[in-house]
Amino acid sequence: MSSAWPPSRPASGSYRPPAVAQRRWRDSLRVWWREIDKVLLGLIMLLMAFGVLAVAAASPASADQLSTARVTLDEFMFLKRHVIFQFMGLSVMIGLSFLSRESARRVGIVVGAIMLALLFVVPIIGEEKNGARRWINLGLSLQPSEFLKPGFAIICAWVLSWRLRDAGLPVIWFVSGLMGLIAALLMAQPNLGDAILFAGIWLVMVLLAGVAWQLILGLIGVGAVGLTLAYFFYDNARNRIDSFLGGGTAFDQVDLAQRTLTAGGWTGSGLWLGIRKMNLPEAHTDYIFSVIGEEFGLIACAVVVALYAAVVLRALLRMTGEDNLFALLAGVGLVTQFGGQAFINILVNLKLFPSKGMTLPLISYGGSSTLAVCFTLGLLLAITRRNPFLAREAGGLRDLIDRKEERS
């Protein structure tokens, strides 16, 4: 019997004894738990739990509408799939939250660049659904614009943060040009709703970057002219606006959603007892907020709105006093995307905005959309991580910018 000790091990220098690897993993987990925003994480988990309940309520209605004489869908098919997507999204979100700010920036830039490239080929090889070509079939139906949103916020934050190195760099024109390119590609699908959301992210970030208000007003004017031209020369925009203002198919859907929303009164009709939802198109996706209103009541709707507002406010409060320009811009851009999408979806269900085909983040059923929202929130959690024992430079970001400008 051989008495050689220690036992043989691979020649590679990457070998680590199991005990050492486990200790390092425990240390990393302790650091993560110390630095993560636990309140923000808890609010996100509450929304995800509410999403499971909401899809459970909407799944029978959507399954019934999509069933045919030959094929009868399982009434809880969408719920089962949604739970799987939620677990996948949660894994993505938690995994990304372990990243450092620098790693989160690199991931966001790489994903944003890949999705922008895919956006060019969507009109050629994309799948068409309901008259729009926005998806690419990669085993999972992938909508590149969904993952481009967080990538766009990260890229804009990275470019705008260059102002601290050289105030003369044309960073505003770069991000504005990128915004214009993305808007043109989205409107070709057509996808006016996402184009408006991208414009909102861009506007918040350039305002926060400290750009002269005269330039901002000029760019907003250009955007207003572009939207006016879109109404006259872009059929999708004109049809949606006309339908919203004067009746038509899209308006009928929004009107039905609003009636479904208020049918349950303050306390709702009860789980699986709603009637109007059975005739509501896309009950499990675009109009799931209306299903919540019918089955759980307007009070539950108010709770959902409060949860979204709490996520946005918590992330913004986390950014208060931040002395890193990239982190500030990226955090605000990501939470603007999340809150803006929820805000638009809720307004559509309240019949206060034209139909946009936009899901309710973390609550609506969806594979690509759920993973994209969790990807966004994973980057947000990584960027908002903060060592509670590490003192930040006194004075906050404004003083940091002023000192940099004085040295220049």
Image (spheres, rainbow, N blue to C red):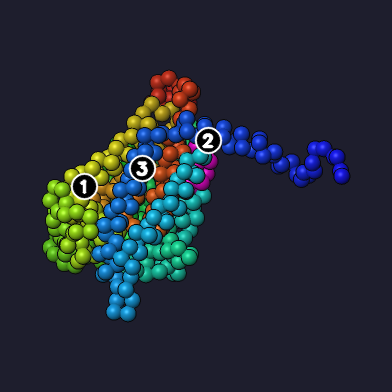
**Which region is colored magenta?**
100-109
Residue drawn where x is 23% and y is 55% of the image: 271
Give the x, y percent position of residue 194.
33, 55
Write down the residue under mark 2: 29
Q: Which mark is residue 403?
A: none
Q: Main secondary structure of the magenta part?
A: helix
- Judged from the image, the secondary structure of the residue bearing numbered disc 2 is helix
Q: Is the residue marked by circle 1 packed among few (<14), some (14-19), or many (20+) residues within 10 Å?
A: many
- Judged from the image, the secondary structure of the residue bearing numbered disc 1 is helix
The amino acid at mark 2 is Leu
Q: Which mark is residue 301?
A: 1
Q: Earlier in the sequence, mark 2 or mark 1?
A: 2
The amino acid at mark 1 is Cys
Asked if the magenta segment contains residue 394, the reply would be: no
Cα distance between the residues tagged 3 and 1: 16 Å
Against 231, is 214 above or below? above
Give the x, y percent position of residue 398.
38, 26
Against 333, is 224 above or below? below
Quarter-wise, where is residue 188 in the image? Answer: bottom left
